[in-house]
Image: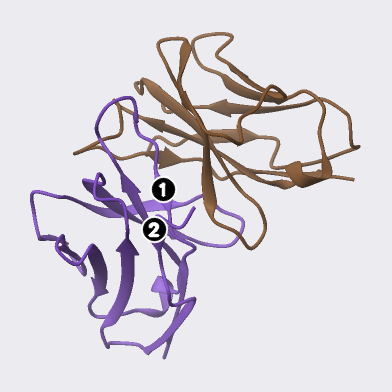
Amino acid sequence: EPEVTQTPSHQVTQMGQEVILRCVPISNHLYFYWYRQILGQKVEFLVSFYNNEISEKSEIFDDQFSVERPDGSNFTLKIRSTKLEDSAMYFCASSPNHGGMGNTIYFGEGSWLTVV
Amino acid sequence: DQQVKQNSPSLSVQEGRISILNCDYTNSMFDYFLWYKKYPAEGPTFLISISSIKDKNEDGRFTVFLNKSAKHLSLHIVPSQPGDSAVYFCAASADRGSTLGRLYFGRGTQLTVWP
């Protein structure tokens, strides 16, 4: 069964460093997302991406975050200057279309980011 | 952001019995609801969904019920199996305007099914 794959599974970085989290969405999907879950808290929406541009972003997705689809298969989340509070599990997700009624969003296994 | 609430952090059920997981929401714009299951160190796995035009959707052992007037949905698992032990997340989406696929999640309910 096709799945969303994410790398790395776990990354430890120093505060202030740049981090890139990578994702390969399911191949025929058109919509891509990043969510995150801080330990003990809810899964929170960060950003959605369609047709090579951001469709929507949450208040969490500030100027230190960016997303890119550099080629036909990868979808990346960059955090420019990491802060301690960025420590979380980051989930990439994809959907065949806009993920609304009648659709499903499929999640990857997550990338655990620890900022020290 | 408390738009989706799962007020029971945990539920313990004996194998073979029914598990009922509850979810409440506050945003009347939500019109599509999903349940996800999550094991530790894994991503959420889609289980079942329901749109606001229905009040019930069934898939094997899993049934989701939606009560729009009460802004309440529930997931029934019958019969419960030990492999069902996981965290269950309720999620909601408003398929209108520019909210393309943004899911609002509850905090999750840890289900434990014991033999």
Tell me the residue that label 2 is attached to: B4
Q: Of helix, strand and loop, which one carries label 2?
A: strand
> Which amino acid is tagged 2?
Val
* Residue B83 in picture, x, y percent from top left: 42, 73
Q: Of helix, strand and loop, which one carries label 1?
A: strand
Which chain does the residue under circle 1 lie in? B
Tell me the residue that label 1 is attached to: B104
Is there a contact, CB below 8 Å, between mark 1 and mark 2? Answer: yes
* Residue A78 in picture, x, y percent from top left: 69, 23
Above or below residue A56? Residue B7 is: below
A97 sits to left or right of B106: left
Residue appearing at x 24%, y 80% in the figure: B79
Q: Coloured how?
A: by chain
Label 2 Cα crowd, 10 Å radius (few <14 / some 14-19 / many 20+): many
Q: Colour of chain A?
A: brown
Label 1 Cα crowd, 10 Å radius (few <14 / some 14-19 / many 20+): many
Residue appearing at x 65%, y 27% in the figure: A62
Gap between marks 1 and 2 measured at Cα: 7 Å
> In this view of the protein, which residue sits in the foreground, B60 or A78?
A78
Above or below residue A11? Residue A41 is: below
Residue appearing at x 34%, y 28% in the figure: B100
Q: Colour of chain B?
A: purple
